Amino acid sequence: MFEILHVAATILLALSTAALAVGVLAQARRTRALGAALGAEREAREELARDLAALLECSRELGGRVRDQAARQKSVADRVNHIAHQVDAGAAIDHVERLLADGLGVEQIKRVCELSQGEAALLERWKKHRSAA
């Protein structure tokens, strides 16, 4: 009887050991899967950090370019204002009106008065407005 109990205990111990081994293997598999998932998350976070750093650098560069452009724009506006104060606009407008009254076209006035393309376009609109009125 003692022998049967001994064999039963041995079988029970073997089964318990096998069940424990299966549990350990399953736990090891889950641990490896979690480790792989953690590694993937770490790589994704590092890639995100690199992207964010690149975006920040780009943002700084764009900010610098915007500041430079604003400074250039202010400089040009200051020069235009300075020139505008120096020019006697009334006399120039009277001269252009005389040329228009004499029948000169916008292109001819542009050449005579050395107007820019924008000034000529404005003059053309003004001429149309005057003739419509």
Image (tube, rainbow, N blue to C red):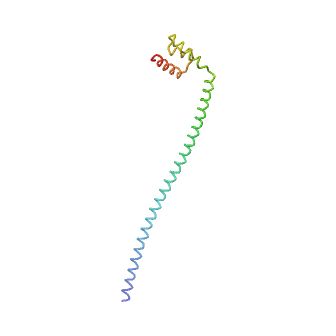
Q: Answer with left or right where residue 131 lies relative to residue 77.
A: left
Q: Position of residue 32 (x, y in %)?
A: 46, 63
Where 124 sits versus 22, above or below?
A: above
Where 4 sits versus 106, above or below?
A: below
> Quick one: 101 or 51, which is closer to the camera?
101
Q: How many marks on residues? A: 0
Q: Position of residue 12 (x, y in %)?
A: 38, 80
Q: Position of residue 68 (x, y in %)?
A: 60, 36
Q: Which residue is the extreme one toward the top?
A: 102
Residue at 63% over, 22% down: 86
Classify the position of the N terminus by image quarter: bottom left
Q: Quadrant of residue 14?
A: bottom left
Residue at 57% over, 40% down: 63
Where 83 sits versus 54, above or below?
A: above
Residue at 53% over, 21% down: 119
Q: Which residue is the extreme one toward the bottom?
A: 1
Q: Quadrant of residue 17?
A: bottom left
